[in-house]
Amino acid sequence: MKRVDLNFGVFELHSQIIIGKMNEGIHYDIYKNRVFIKLIDKFYGKLKPFSFICIRDSDYSLDPMIHKYNSKYENFCSIAVVERNLMRRSTVKLESVFFKPGKFCKFPSVTEAILWANHQIDLKKLESENINLLN
């Protein structure tokens, strides 16, 4: 596991999952996303499948179009959002419209998010194997 502290959040890069927490009060935009994507490319490359788990314990804003941009990456399997504060208004339903269908979900715990994210990676690997068998 590698821990990286960027100026807008802290990210733990595991073998196939990134667990991240954004800093309080930031606005996550295309510029911050470019830094994040560079980190991903450096650690996972362009082919290795991975999933992102975002722990939303702090208040910050996000441009949902980021998800549309990130959905073009084949190896970016899924996004799991962990929201433990049930009193906070969630934007997950809106954000999920901009990412790959069925690959953006909300969870009450990190454990559940990890299980789902690993399953999404396994599905991607199976899909890739099936495509290779057909060629």
Image: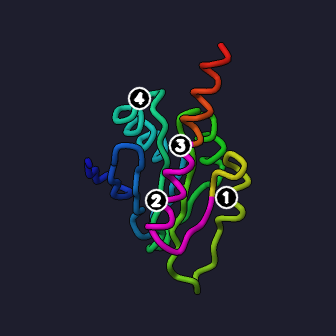
Residue 43 locus on image (x, y percent): 34, 36
Q: Is residue 19 above or below residue 84?
A: above
- Residue that extends furthest to the front in the rendered view of this protein: 133
Q: Residues within 10 Å of mark 2 (few under 14, many from 20)?
A: many
Q: Secondary structure at mark 1?
A: helix
Q: Earlier in the sequence, mark 2 or mark 4?
A: 4
Q: CA distance from mark 3 to mark 2?
A: 12 Å
Q: Are marks 3 and 2 in contact (CB under 8 Å)?
A: no
3D distance between C-alphas at marks 4 and 1 = 25 Å
Residue at the location (34% across, 48% down)?
A: 13
Q: Secondary structure at mark 4?
A: loop
Q: Which mark is residue 45?
A: 4
Q: Nearer the viewer, mark 1 or mark 2?
A: 2
Q: Secondary structure at mark 2?
A: helix
Which residue in the structure is indicated by mark 1? 95
Identify the residue at horizontal 67%, vertical 17% (top origin).
Answer: 134
Q: How many marks?
A: 4
User: Distance of mark 2 from mark 4, alpha carbons?
Assistant: 21 Å
Report the residue at 66% width, 43% height from top: 68
In this figure, which residue is indicated by the disc labeled 2?
A: 114
Compared with residue 48, is residue 13 higher up or lower down, i.e. above or below?
below
User: Which residue in the protein does label 3 denote?
Assistant: 122
**Mark 4 Cα shell of 10 Å, populated few (<14), some (14-19), many (≥20):** few
Q: Earlier in the sequence, mark 3 or mark 1?
A: 1
